[in-house]
Image (spheres, rainbow, N blue to C red):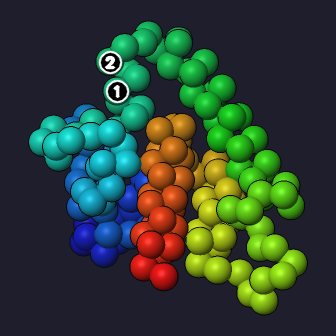
């Protein structure tokens, strides 16, 4: 499959260039730091990490709980008008790229597009990092 069609588990966009050593999950290697990974050598996704530590029964329970939690986080961020990360303030004339990024993350979480909390957390860290970079350049 061409690189341009491979979906990253963090940004959920195409361009993933690194495959999990144990399953088909893929990530763009530039996001490894957001997953807490120091090296791309033998990268293992969040789900496969869990499979090394827990029984199949426990994995099913953990994933069911994480799925509900991810969707709850997404719904909370999407619906809570007080959240400055996903909702623009009334004084703003238009949404900024950061609020759009967090709103997209929230919507994707609601849809269950993140399979484990680790991937959702990495996406949020990435968006926060971009926000801080943007603010420091102003």
Q: Position of residue 110 (x, y in %)?
A: 71, 51
Circle on res. 97: none
- Mark 2 to mark 1: distance in Å? 5 Å
Q: Position of residue 23 (x, y in %)?
A: 30, 39
**Dot 1 crowding, Cα within 10 Å, few <14, some 14–19, many 20+:** few
**Dot 2 crowding, Cα within 10 Å, few <14, some 14–19, many 20+:** few
The quarter of the picture where the N terminus appears is bottom left
The secondary element bearing badge 1 is classed as: helix
Q: Does residue 65 appear to the left or right of 14 in the view shown?
A: right
Please state which of residues 30 and 108 is positioned toward the viewer in this rendering.
Answer: 30
Residue of label 2: 52
Q: Does residue 70 appear to the left or right of 128 in the view shown?
A: right
Residue 110 shows in the view: no
Q: Residue at x 78, y 83 (%)?
A: 92
Image marks 2 and 1: residues in contact by CB distance under 8 Å: yes
Q: Does residue 115 appear to the left or right of 49 in the view shown?
A: right
Q: Which residue appears farthest toward the bottom when viewing the image?
A: 93
Residue of label 1: 49
């Amino acid at each position: 499959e061409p690189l341009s069609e491979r979906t990253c588990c963090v940004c959920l966009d195409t361009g993933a260039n690194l495959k999990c050593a144990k399953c088909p999950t893929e990530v763009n290697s530039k996001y490894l730091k957001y997953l807490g990974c120091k090296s791309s050598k033998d990268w293992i996704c969040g789900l496969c990490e869990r499979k090394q530590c827990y029984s199949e029964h426990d994995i099913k329970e953990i994933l069911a709980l994480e799925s509900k939690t991810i969707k709850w986080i997404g719904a909370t961020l999407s619906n809570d008008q007080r959240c400055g990360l996903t909702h623009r303030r009334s004084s703003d004339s238009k949404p900024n790229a950061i609020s759009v990024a967090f709103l997209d993350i929230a919507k994707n979480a609601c849809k269950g597009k993140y399979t484990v909390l680790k991937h959702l957390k990495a996406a949020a860290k990435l968006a926060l990092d971009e926000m801080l970079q943007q603010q420091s350049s102003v």
